Amino acid sequence: MSSVRLAVRRAAAVTALAATAVLAAAGIASAHVTVHPDSYAKGATDGLLTFRVPNEEDSAGTTKVQVFLPTDHPVLGVLVAPQDGWTAKVTTSKLKTPVKTDDGTITDAVSEITWTGGKIGAGQFEDFHVAFGQLPDDTDQLAFKTLQTYSDGKVVRWIEETEPGADEPEDPAPVLKLTAKGVSDEGASDEGTSAASPLPSKTSAAVASSDSADSTARGLGIAGLVVGVLGLAAAGFAVVRGRNSGARSE
């Protein structure tokens, strides 16, 4: 009987360690501020960017989010979607190099969006939606440096840019890749989203967030189920082997 109990304990320990590893990996993967989709075609028009901000602190909530838009390669026609509990302040800046468009020359562009008034609690995230009229076509990527302020005064600076061939920095800035027209990684068309497509409603934004959370939960649940089944199988095998050994000894 002692060998059976030992096998069961070992199986339980393996199950616990594997489940912990799965949960830790999921936490690491979702810890950074990110932009979705992560790519668009160069010069795409009438599209939508979503900035996902997770809360990494156990004892403080996120109370302020600042996203800085590049002005050397400006994003034109920026509009911010209403967000329950949050107030958005949009700051524009003069462009060093005006941009010529079919509608005229653009001399100002949005350089910063600051959300305040809301709160992202521990173990939660928030999606902030920003529509654009046109993306630049003269660069391969856009880095949206972001500051995340917590209720205890801590500020996390998501401003580091990944160098080609180097490992991802500790606090990377959200990066949008700009691809040749027609080859966007996320399947965006050459022209981005249709101009007739409305901004996501509060309900659809909540559904999108819920769907993402559900997908993560299902993935973790399946992984945990697989690990648990393996542990039970190992324990069952040990029990059967112990019984067989006992029968032979008799």
Image (spheres, rainbow, N blue to C red):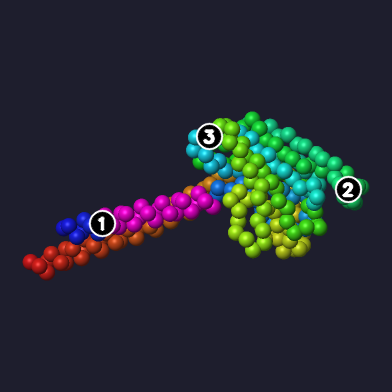
Report the predominant secondary structure element of the magenta stretch. helix
Q: Residue at x 70, y 57 (%)?
A: 177
Instruction: Identify the secondary structure beneath mark 2.
Output: strand
The percent position of residue 167, horizontal first and vertical second, equals 60, 59
N-terminal-most mark, 1 or 3: 1
CA separation in Å, label 1 and label 3: 40 Å
Task: Please say if 137 is above or below 208.
Answer: below
Marks 2 and 1, Cα distance to the nearest angstrom? 70 Å
Relative depth, front residue between 112 and 118: 112
Start-end of magenta stretch: 9-29
Label 3 and label 2: CA atoms lie apart by 42 Å
The quarter of the image holding the N terminus is bottom left
Answer whether labels 3 and 2 touch (C-beta < 8 Å): no
Q: What amino acid is found at the position of numbered circle 3 in the picture?
A: Ala
Q: Residues within 10 Å of mark 2 (few under 14, many from 20)?
A: some
Is residue 163 magenta-colored? Answer: no
Residue type at tag 1? Val
**Residue 248 can be seen in this image:** yes
Q: Determine which residue is flagged by label 1.
A: 8
Tell me the tag on residue 206: none
Q: Tell me where residue 182 appears, x and y as whole percent.
A: 75, 63
Query: In the shown orientation, is residue 125 left or right of residue 179?
Result: left
Asked if residue 147 lies left or right of residue 54, the reply is right
Q: Split into 4 quadrants, where in the image is the C terminus?
A: bottom left
Quarter residue 230 falls in? bottom left
Question: Where is residue 24 drawn, in percent x and y?
Answer: 46, 51
Residue 26 position, x and y percent, is 50, 52
Residue underneath mark 3: 60
